[in-house]
Image: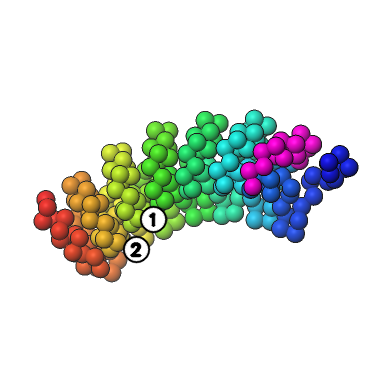
Amino acid sequence: MLLDKDADCKKCNKWGQSALMMACEHDQIEIVKILLDRGANSNKCDNENQSPLMMACKHGQIEIVNMFLDRRADYNQRGSWGRSNVMIACKLGHTQIAKLLLEKRADCYKCDVFDQSPLMMACKHGQIEIVNMLLERGAYCNQCDKWGQSSLMMTCKHGHTEIGKMLLDRRADCNKCDKWGQSALMMACDHGRIEIVKILLDRGANSNKCDNKDQSPLMMKNSEDFVRARCRL
């Protein structure tokens, strides 16, 4: 009705958000379709550099994502911190949306401003299906962020055992260290991840390697897990 009375569908509020963005956020599929048919800009971003497609990806609105992709919205557009639509889907575990974007050849290798990849985000947040999908598409598991941390390190720190196994099966380097000299084994010990500690030791992790402060895995705050894992070998 408002559009029939020449309401401006491209107008934005003080945060730079358009009617299209708000409709995406609240899964208003019919309204999104009407706005797009009336010429709403699907690539216009708000003040935080988020596009309507990013909003739909963030909230898991798969029908709206499909609609944007059919209308050739820019799926490689980057928002705040240099994060893309596929990164957002990977981080939040929206598997079908991630799959749709990857099928459109969304860039799954490019990193954000912290040099973190979609794979790192999926690993950190325990999104096992998405991790598998990215690995099948050739995502590089030994890539590191600006702090020198790899997907395996993030996985070990957060205790995602099955993802850790998947990465090791893909020859993730279990002895790689970050800028503080800490390895995946040290992180697993420090956070009390006993199952991961055992897996890493089984796969040849160096139990005597020290970090930049000359601390070994045995010196970490949860080192009793390291001792138990060693005793099981």
In the image: residue 4, left or right of residue 178: right
**SS of the residue at dot 1?**
loop
Q: Tell whether position 62 is magenta.
A: no
Give the quadrant of residue 27: top right
**Residue 139, numbered label:** none
> In the image, is residue 207 above or below residue 67?
below
Q: Mark 1: which amino acid?
A: Gly
Q: Earlier in the sequence, mark 1 or mark 2?
A: 1
Q: Mark 2: which amino acid?
A: Trp
Residue 217, percent from left and from top: 22, 62
What's the CA distance linking mark 1 and mark 2? 8 Å
Q: Can residue 192 be seen in this view?
A: yes
> Residue at (18%, 57%) from the top-left corner?
207
**Residue 180, numbered label:** 2
Q: Which span is picked out in magenta?
A: 26-40
Answer yes or no: do the residues labelled 1 and 2 have beta carbons within 8 Å? yes
The overriding secondary structure of the stretch rendered in magenta is: helix
Give the quadrant of residue 148: bottom left
In the image: residue 79, left or right of residue 227: right
The quadrant of the rendering that contains the N terminus is top right
The residue at which mark 1 appears reads as 148
> Residue at (15%, 61%) from the top-left corner?
227
